[in-house]
Amino acid sequence: MKNTKQCPKCQSRDPVRIEGTVGAYGSGNNILAGASIFSAVKVTRYVCVSCGFSEEWIEDRVGLDKIRSKYQYL
């Protein structure tokens, strides 16, 4: 949905973007990539308001690099 602006499940063209947040004690839509909230990587959601399908994206390269450094493929 992020790239096509269309839901892959129902083909609706009615997605909404919900930007990731970082709050106190790690709350919000994020991934902690270190010991504090300052290392948190925001996760943006795209939700189809027609059928409820959702996707989550890390939208910046710095965030992806933080995740790569902290987590390794199993």
Image: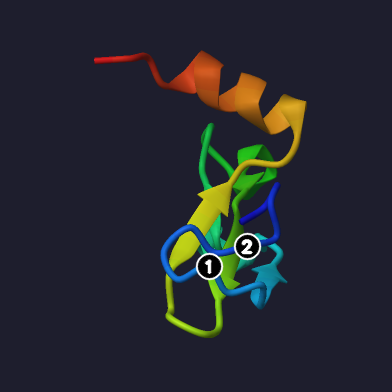
Q: Which mark sits nearer the N-terminus, 2 or 1?
A: 2
Q: Alpha-carbon neighbours of circle 2 within 10 Å: few (<14), some, or many (≥20)?
A: some
> Where is residue 33 shown, x and y percent of the image?
53, 33
State the mark number for residue 19.
none
Q: Alpha-carbon neighbours of circle 1 within 10 Å: few (<14), some, or many (≥20)?
A: few
State the mark number for residue 6.
2
Residue 6 falls in image quadrant: bottom right
Residue farthest to the bottom, as pictured:
50
> Where is residue 2 shown, x and y percent of the image?
67, 52
Circle 2: element type: loop
**Structural distance between the alpha carbons of marks 2 and 1:** 6 Å
Q: Quadrant of the N terminus?
A: bottom right
Residue farthest to the left, as pictured:
74
Residue matched to label 1 = 11
> Where is residue 44 shown, x and y percent of the image?
64, 56
State the residue in front, 37 or 44. 44
Residue 15 falls in image quadrant: bottom right
The image shows residue 71, relative to residue 54, as above or below, that is above
Task: Check disc 2 and give the amino acid type.
Answer: Gln
Task: Check disc 1 and give the amino acid type.
Answer: Gln
Residue farthest to the front, as pictured:
11
Identify which residue is drawn at 64% across, 20% down.
65
- The reply to whether the C-beta atoms of the residues labelled 2 and 1 are less than 8 Å apart is yes
